[in-house]
Amino acid sequence: MKFIYSAPNLLLVSHCKNLLESYGIECIIKNENLNSAAGEIPPTECWPELWLMDSKNYQRAVYILNSERQNQYLWICPSCHESLEEQFDRCWSCGDWKID
């Protein structure tokens, strides 16, 4: 097993787990219920952690997670060049419309 990712939010860790599993990379979440120990243990030690079952998949998993982070913004506003997520069809900054 090999550690790959940790975050303060279980939702983020679960999303990464689901993403990797969609590519056939088996993984598990540790510290899923440890948040109640925060204070007794340093908070970052209580964060949920994502672990790969097979360390041979580490480089591929890192590539997949990095690619996902880079694809968070899928279009650039033609007027003000703001980066926007795919679900928006109008720029929140200047109000210009997405060009398809």
Image: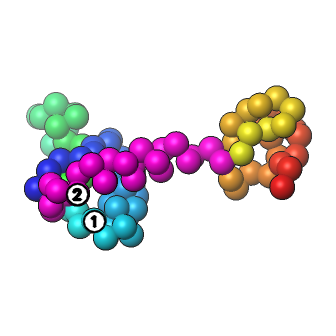
Of residue 65 and residue 5, the one placed in the foreground of this image is 65
Residue type at mark 2 is Asn
Query: Residue 57 shows which numbered tag?
Result: 2
Choose the circle earlier in sequence order: 2 or 1.
1
Q: Bounds of the magenta span?
A: 52-74
Q: How is the image coloured?
A: rainbow
Is residue 56 found left or right of 80 in the rendered image?
Answer: left
Is residue 68 found left or right of 48 in the rendered image?
Answer: right
| Mark 2–mark 1 CB contact (< 8 Å) | yes
- Using the rendered view, name the quadrant where residue 93 is placed: top right
Describe the element under mark 1 as helix, strand or loop. Answer: loop
Q: Kindly identify which residue carries mark 1.
A: 25
Q: Is residue 54 magenta?
A: yes
Classed neighbour count for the residue bearing mark 2: other residues with Cα under 10 Å, few (<14), some (14–19), many (≥20): some
Classed neighbour count for the residue bearing mark 1: other residues with Cα under 10 Å, few (<14), some (14–19), many (≥20): some
Image location (x, y in percent) of residue 24: 31, 70
Q: CA distance from mark 2 to mark 1?
A: 7 Å
Of residue 77 and residue 34, the one placed in the foreground of this image is 77
**Residue drawn 16% across and 37% down?**
45
Q: Is residue 48 visible?
A: no
Image location (x, y in percent) of residue 36: 20, 46
Residue type at mark 1 is Ile
Describe the element under mark 2 as helix, strand or loop. Answer: helix
